[in-house]
């Protein structure tokens, strides 16, 4: 990933935070030179979350995909995968600026991870990954979902997935959030995003405010 210095993360914990807030990413592999990609839920292994705040190298990413998906059959343990997590993004029109000349652009946030993969087929391991995924995705819901009545159901259907773990060898990220614009433009576009009725635009505005210090 190309990341100019002025679009780099200002704090080491940004990458982990973006993944935590956007746990639905893209798992990319290659089969005889042909790229394969699947959109899947993925999360930082709970045991690695504290260390992830200082950097993702060495941390484990876990996830799963449908067993009917052809992609996992083309993967061997140890193959290196690319995982992509996209955060808030949005178009910035020159009409949002109080002065000209200007050019249209797109603000966005993203994290790319690469590393070797391990596939899991064991029943108990599949249940563990599913339960960790539910723990992560349900933790901020109020009221949260009580999974106990569905335990037997999970036990019956879990064979329909394949779980995986990628140990991060390299991480790259970009936070293009109007840092290349004069302060008066950055402030105005940030305030507009934060006041937007669209939730995604407000999330983008929150990251722009963070990047602006």
Image: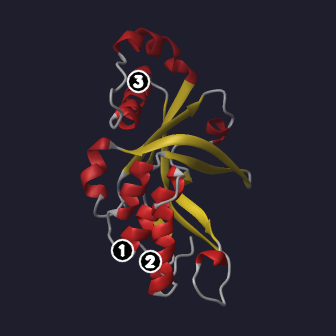
**In x, y percent, where is residue 15?**
40, 61
**In x, y percent, where is residue 22?**
47, 49
Disc 3/disc 1 C-alpha distance (Å): 37 Å
- Which residue occupies 29% across, 49% down? 48
Tell me which numbered mark, 2 or 3, is placed earlier along the sequence: 3
Q: Which residue is mark 2?
A: 187
- Which residue occupies 49% across, 52% down? 116
Q: Quadrant of residue 106?
A: bottom right
- Which residue occupies 63% across, 50% down? 29
Which quarter shows the N terminus? bottom right
**In x, y percent, where is residue 65?**
57, 34
Label 2 element class: helix
Residue 87 appears in the rendering = no
Task: Tell me, yes or no, whether the two marked residues, 2 and 3, touch with CB atoms within 8 Å.
Answer: no
Q: For label 3, count other residues whose C-alpha is less than 10 Å away and answer few (under 14), some (14-19) or many (20+).
A: some
On screen, residue 200 above or below 209: above
Q: Which residue is mark 1?
A: 10
Front one among 202 and 128: 202
Q: Which residue is mark 3?
A: 127
């Amino acid at each position: 990933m190309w990341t100019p210095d002025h679009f780099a993360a200002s704090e080491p914990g940004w990458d982990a935070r973006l993944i935590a807030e956007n746990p639905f990413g893209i798992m990319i592999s290659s089969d005889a030179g042909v790229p394969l990609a699947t959109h899947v839920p993925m999360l930082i292994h709970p045991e690695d979350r504290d260390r992830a705040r200082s950097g993702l190298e060495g941390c484990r990413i876990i996830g799963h995909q449908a067993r009917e998906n052809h992609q996992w059959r083309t993967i061997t343990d140890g193959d290196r995968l690319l995982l992509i997590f996209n955060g808030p993004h949005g178009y910035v029109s020159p009409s949002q600026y109080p002065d000209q000349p200007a050019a249209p652009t797109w603000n966005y946030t993203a994290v790319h991870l690469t590393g070797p993969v391990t596939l899991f087929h064991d029943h108990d391991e599949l249940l563990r990954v599913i339960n960790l995924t539910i723990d992560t995705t349900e933790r901020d819901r109020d009221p949260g979902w009580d999974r106990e009545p569905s335990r037997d159901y999970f036990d019956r259907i879990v064979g329909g997935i394949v779980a995986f773990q990628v140990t991060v060898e390299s991480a790259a990220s970009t936070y293009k959030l109007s840092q290349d614009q004069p302060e008066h433009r950055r402030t105005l576009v940030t305030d507009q995003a934060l006041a937007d009725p669209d939730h995604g635009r407000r999330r983008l505005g929150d990251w722009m405010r963070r990047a602006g210090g």
